[in-house]
Image (cartoon, helix red, strand yellow):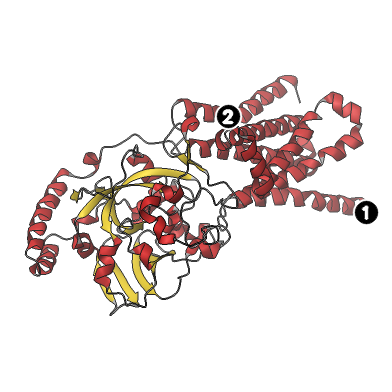
Amino acid sequence: MLIGKPPDIPASEITPRELCDRFFNRRRFLSGAAAIGAAALGADRLAEVFDPSIDALAGTKLQTVKSSLTTTGEELTSYQDVTTYNNFYEFGVDKSQPSQNAGSLPTRPWTVRVDGLVKKPLVFDIDALLRLRPLEDRVYRHRCVEAWSMVIPWVGYSLSEFIRQCDPLPSAKYVQFLSYFDKKIEKWQSESSIFWPYSEGLRIDEAMHPLTLLTFGLYGEVLPNQNGAPVRVVIPWKYGFKSAKSIVALRFLDKQPPTTWNDQSAREYGFYSNVNPNVDHPRWSQKSERRIGQPFYAQRRTTLIFNGYADQVASLYNGMDLRKYF
Amino acid sequence: MKRPTLILLKIFVWLACLYPLGSLVWRAVTNNLGADPTAAISFSTGLATLRLLTISLAITPLRRLYTRLSWLVKFRRLLGLFAFFYASLHLLTYIALYAGFDLNTMATDISKRRFITMGVAAWLLLLSLAATSTTWAIRKLGGKRWDRLHKLVYVAAVCGVIHYWWQVKPGVLTPLTITVILGVLLAARPVLNWMQRRRVQSA
């Protein structure tokens, strides 16, 4: 059941001012340290000791830079809707549940394990990931396989930047994302018959595409837990379920990895799941979509092939039958 | 039952049956239908249909268990008609907000998508029951034939629940509660028949 919207609360009222100021100072200090190069990592560690994990708080402002890969000309979906209308089945199957239940997700300490076909397995701390590259503001259209859509200003950098740090072997053809899973914390996991942990995957060239975003925030702030804190991927030309949340591991493979919804119903959810108005879901048409946050008489709009990113990504699928590899 | 009590009860039942609509209209007017108003409207009208059908199907077993509750039958037609009313709103939501009044889209949906086929089938069954719900129709058809025709309400309810299961993602278990309740109500009939036969035999 859907619930009414609580009144909008400005982010400035949620985040204590004092914390924000400390955070900004530290950021400035860190960006200076990064310029020193090799010394930066040591300085980061040192900063961590004196000033542990302020980044952890959802809603904390992030320092961001502009990006040429941002989508223009779209009205943003409200922060309220982006953060209270979520599919995150580990925290309940109802759209309003994740925002109520995901508070218990422990986003610090957090590490991302990298294994499989890599030179050597690595473990990255979330704070190191946050500092790996400048964080960019990237507005993307977000199209759910359920035929609703949003426009979301994400914060992150291209996943390719991170993958370069992972040293995958030439034999790695796919990358798998594994999401956090702990049934003591995600008590709602039994509301569906899904096999956890949530698993998603991309072909390596899709993962290396600059639009594929390693995402840490939205609306210029740290990701709220229900949106996949502390780190997720966003692949704007694919249905939303491909964009795995709360990632704890990246695995490089030579074969297509098993993925959650494809395992659940291969007929309905293909491995590729590129947004495609010409390939219907067996249970509904994908020709059009409902824009979230619009009044009921104005929600309907036409779905664009590759969610409007065809110019950038269509070449990835040259010669492929998109009906067969849906 | 005394007449004033009955009138009071009728008013209460009418208000309860109108509540889902009232709440929808209120939420629409105050811009409180949530992030996806179209989905909210179709979900709440569909759920109201299934709930009302389930309640109307509970009346017969209740009457047979407790003869003192036999007056409940006075509300069965009202509940059934309200179920049809919400089913029609549900269908209208689909026609207007999902299919955009486009006949081609509707034809494809009905022929290709089994959850929509099932939903339309359930609505047609309810339509035939609503059309024959008048006292005139009962007299015209004759009690026995009318009774047999209106047994279709079970089929309609089962179609409605299947429609719900086929609409949600595989693996999602939200339709489970209403399915279990409906299952119990359907099973109650043969069980009550069997109990009655035993009582007759031992008497």
Is residue A182 visible to us here? no
> Foreground mark, 1 or 2?
2
Q: Which amino acid does label 1 sit on?
A: Gln
At a point 29% along the width and 47% down the height, the residue shown is A70
Q: For residue B157, which numbered disc appears in the image?
A: none
Residue B201, which numbered label? 1
Report the Cα–Cα distance between label 1 and label 2.
49 Å
Of the two numbered discs 1 and 2 on the same chain, state the one appearing first in sequence: 2
> What amino acid type should be assigned to the residue bearing mark 2?
Leu
Please state the chain letter of the residue tagged with numbered disc 1 in the rendered image: B
- Left or right placement of residue B103 versus residue A304 in this view: right
Measured as percent of width and height from the top left, residue A238 is found at 43, 54
Badge 1 crowding class, 10 Å Cα cut-off, few under 14, some 14 to 19, many 20 or more, is few
Specify whether residue A277 is in view: yes
Sort mark 2 into few (<14), some (14-19) or many (20+) by Cα contacts within 10 Å.
some
Identified at 73% across, 30% down, the residue is B75
Q: Mark 2 = which residue?
A: B21
